Every structure is written in structure tokens, then in C-alpha cells.
Image: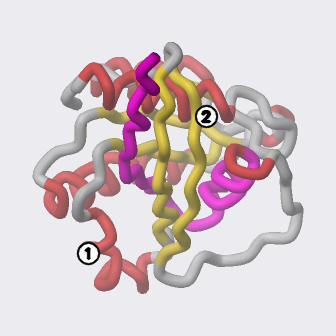
Amino acid sequence: MSKTKELMYKIILAGDGAVGKTSLIERFVSGKFEKDYKMTLGTNIFSKVVNVDSVPVKFVIWDLAGQPHFKHVRSGFYLGAAGALLVYDVTRRSTLESLNNWRSEMLSNTGNVSALVVVGNKCDLDDMREVRVKEGQDYAQNLGAPFFETSAKDGDNVESAFVALARGIIKGKHP
């Protein structure tokens, strides 16, 4: 009996500072949520294996600092990325509006990625919402990308977003 070969992909999470990229990764990797905000300095690297349609997929996850003053160090961290989660905060409209800049920065530094997933994070803060679900769906649809609203705090749709990214990479979908 032959063992299924584990696939390994470098992925990145891109988006403005404080949209919850690190919290999404920590929820995905460890199942935990830290309520205290810690700014990412440069990049953090995580890994996790998920089974996607009976195929083990190892993600090497690069968490990029979203603050503008880290832009000059981010370019090298994009290299070799197979896919990306473009993350915005549903309570801050400006973070959705800046996703085009993030996508451009990523594509200019990678050439291309196999798959994108658009993620509207912090859906547990519905009373503070500035971005309607439909706006996020429309943005993702324009890119031909899957869309998820997530809550790193509650765990809602976090695993689903990463699994959708793995499926997109495996299928070789281009944004």
C-alpha cells in the first residue's frame, strides 16, 4: 500500500495591520485565540498539515506585517508563495478598500500565485460592521476567488477558508 505524498505550499496572509491575520493563523494552527493585540514585526512563520480530499497538505504560513513602514521588508517574503488569503476587517471599510493595493504588491513580488481567498474577518463584531457581506462577496467574485467571513475569536469559517485556499492551489486556479 503506497502512502499519499504530502503536498507542501508556502502561503501568505496579506492585509492592513490589525485586521486579524495573526489571530486567524493562530486559530487555524492551534485552535486558540489571543485577545491581546501583538503587532507582527516583519513576518512570522507557522505550519500546519490539513487533509484536503484525502490528500495531506502542509501549509508553511507566512504572516506579513501590515503596517506601511514594513513595506520595504515585505517584498522578499512574498517569493515562492503558492497562494494567499487577502484579509480585511469587516469593522473598517478602509481595510477592504486597500485589498487592491495588497494584491498588486503581492503580484508584483511573486509574479503570480495559484489561488486567492478573500476573507472578511471579525464577523463576530456585527454591531460595529462597516462592510456588508455582499460587498466582500462582490470583491471576491470580481477576482474569481472564494469568499469567507470569519471570526478568529469564535473560529467561524477559519478552517474552511484555509481548506478552500488549498483546493484552489491544488487545482491551479489563477486569480
Q: Nearer the viewer, mark 1 or mark 2?
A: 1
Image coordinates for residue 56, horizontal then vertical, percent:
50, 31
Res 142 visible? no
Q: Is residue 44 left or right of residue 173?
A: right
**Quick one: 27 or 17, which is closer to the camera?**
27
Q: Tell me the kind of residue under disc 1.
A: Gly
**Quick one: 129 or 41, which is closer to the camera?**
41
Q: Tell me the kind of residue under disc 2.
A: Val
104 up-or-down from 128: above or below? below
Q: Is residue 124 left or right of residue 48?
A: right
- Residue at the spot of label 2: 131
For mark 2, give the secondary structure. Answer: loop
Residue extending furthest toward the front: 1
Image coordinates for residue 169, horizontal then vertical, percent:
32, 31
Q: Is residue 46 left or right of residue 112?
A: right
Q: Which residues are magenta?
A: 1-27
**Quick one: 113 or 105, which is closer to the camera?**
113
Name which residue lies at 49% across and 56% down: 61
- Residue at the spot of label 1: 76
Image coordinates for residue 16, horizontal then vertical, percent:
50, 61
The picture quadrant where one finds residue 172 is top left
Name which residue lies at 45% across and 26% down: 3
Name which residue lies at 80% across and 36% down: 155
Mark closest to the chain's N terminus, 1 or 2: 1
63 up-or-down from 171: above or below? below
Res 74 visible? yes
